[in-house]
Image (cartoon, coloured by chain):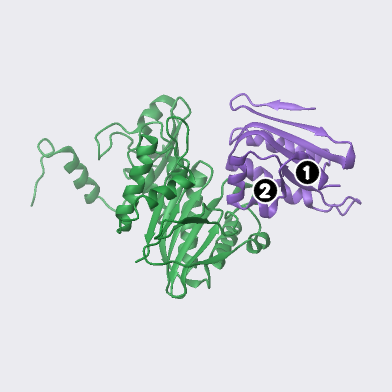
Chain colours: A green, B purple
Amino acid sequence: MRSFDPDVIPYNEIHRLLVGGVAPRPIALVSTLDKEGRSNLSPFSFFNVFGVNPAVLCFSPSYSGKTGNPKHTMLNLLETKECTVSIVTFEMVHQISLASAPYERGVDEFIKSGDYYDFSTLWDGSPMIAIGDVSGKGISASLYMAETKGVVQALAPVMASMAELLEGTNGALLHNSPSLTSLRRSFVTLGLVSLGKKGVRYARAGHTPLLHVRADGTYRFLQPLGMAVGLIRQPIFVEAQEEISIEVQPGDVLVLFSDGITDARNAEGQEVGYDRLAEYVRDNLDVHNARDLTLKMLASVAEFTNSGNFDDDATLVVMRCL
Amino acid sequence: MMQQQNSSSRFEVSERSETRADITVIELSGQLDAHTAPEFERFLERVVRDEGKRKLVLDFHGLEYISSAGLGVLMGLIEEVRAVDSNSSTTGGDMKLAALPEKIFHVLDLLGFPIVFQIFPTVREAEAAFL
């Protein structure tokens, strides 16, 4: 039998042993406000009900197992004495993982959990890349994004086209909502790119346009018709949907991005903007690896803003045609 | 003219009635965000439901920012404004948007609002579309 002496082994090793030794555990998603009214959203895996009379629900907002620093949730609870506790479901795992990242105190993880990207396979076997951004704030927006991700994943393999996939997603979200009024408090933008035998195709539901930079350095932003998901009833949504085909050549670059990238500002208040983003690709057309190109672009954004931080979620998906 | 101001975010909404064709122009200024959207919603509901006004031009000239909550208010009322009231002889109305600052138009354009709303460069042109 192995034995462990907590007085000898490091703190993070104790943490690893305990969380690995007692599993599975439910995950609590706890929201708090600090005295300035700034919100925080954090998951806790030390969480359960411990009694009925009196009713006791416990979670442990003490010190981060990763950094050893006091968690913002605890600091906020000491200041305001209030929190809400929700349960994390499987579909929410990616968003929750974003919320648990060690952001500065005062950073609103409600906003940070607003973007997503994902990979799916369409009915004809074509790979599809999805990017999404949820508007609004609050736990409902975060859950809404998780729900949208689940719907897109479930529908992608059975829909005949991406336009139909977006229509189906809009229909499902409207169907699941208690009322249109509550739904419209937040909505989701989606951009979908498929890479099939028919070539590259793009469909959009209110999302930022797709950037296409050709190997010769010319570029364009493609913005087919399409309303954000969850805003409008099905007949109008369907009527406004468009799916386009994109002709690409070897060396061309396609970029899906969220507005957190183009809205990033420097100290003078200037935004990165669309054209500057295209310039960052043009400046690095000799970089053949898409991952390296992504890092170069992010470095260019950081250099422009003179900061590695973004006010909003920032997502960049870069595709290079071989 | 009625005017309301929110204490936390700077936002003002006011209305003026045009004598011709029962048009009501609603002027927005400041920040239409999650804090001020409920006030805007109450204002619009009063105009539409209580006062029965159906020909609305929303003047965005002074608006600096609109959040999703503000956009939701527009979407939430447009169908009601356009609905034909079967109990009276009134025809369906409309809510037209005018004088959008470039940044705000860009956001609305991306989200697909021009599919649902008629958007005009000036209030005058929006009014003319009712005549």
Instruction: Name the quarter where the N terminus of chain B is drawn.
Output: top right
Mark seen at residue B125: 1
Tag 2: residue type? Met
In the picture of the structure, the residue carrying the numbered disc 2 is B75
Q: Tell me which residue sits at (71%, 36%) in the image.
A: B42
Crowding at mark 2 (Cα within 10 Å: few <14, some 14-19, many 20+):
some
Crowding at mark 1 (Cα within 10 Å: few <14, some 14-19, many 20+):
some
Residue nearer the viewer, B98 or A177: B98
Residue A286 in picture, x, y percent from top left: 31, 56
Q: Tell me which residue sits at (76%, 41%) in the image.
A: B57
Q: Horizontally, is A156 left or right of A288 in the view?
A: right
Which structural element holds mark 2? helix
Residue nearer the viewer, B104 or B90: B104
Which structural element holds mark 1? helix
Residue B38 in picture, x, y percent from top left: 65, 36
Q: Quadrant of residue A213?
A: bottom left
